[in-house]
Image (cartoon, rainbow, N blue to C red):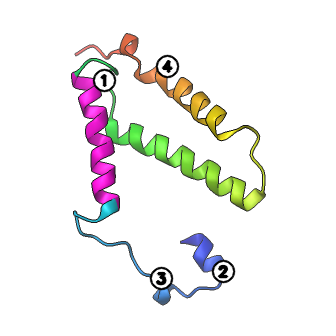
Amino acid sequence: MAVLRAAGIPKDKMRPLPAEDDAAPARSYRAFLDWFRRAQRLGRIGACDVDALASTILGSLYHRATMAGVCGHADASREAHVEALIGLLWSGIGVSNRLET
């Protein structure tokens, strides 16, 4: 929204995202969350808030792409960035880090 405003597009010309639960982005996000929930049930990842995890992953990837476009640079390859991100997150969600219940 900030980028659109900075480009001079008036607020009343911006179209809100569809609120329907069956919109493609909503379905995709629910599928992503369900994938993490299945991984938890199968013991492949530890206890964590899957919504926070999914948002963190998507936000990091979106931010990197945005900054590469805005700043015109990326310090590492996309593959290296994804690998570093997952390595960082794995230390928190790995099965060896299960929360005691």
For marks 4 and 3, the one nearer the N-term is 3
At x 42%, y 81%, the residue is 15
Q: Secondary structure at mark 1?
A: loop
Give the distance between the C-alpha atoms of the residues marked 1 and 2, in whole angstroms: 42 Å
Q: Which region of the structure is painted magenta?
A: 25-41
For marks 2 and 3, the one nearer the N-term is 2
Q: Is residue 84 above or below residue 29?
A: above
Give the distance between the C-alpha atoms of the residues marked 1 and 3, in whole angstroms: 39 Å
Disc 2 marks which amino acid? Ala
Disc 1 marks which amino acid? Ala
Q: Which residue is mark 1?
A: 47
Q: Which residue is mark 4?
A: 91
At x 62%, y 71%, the residue is 3
Residue 20's disc is none
Residue 40 on the magenta span: yes
Q: Is residue 8 above or below residue 95?
A: below
**Residue 68: percent from the left, percent from the top?**
71, 53
Left or right of 46: which side holds 89?
A: right
Disc 4 marks which amino acid? Ser
Q: Which residue is mark 2?
A: 7
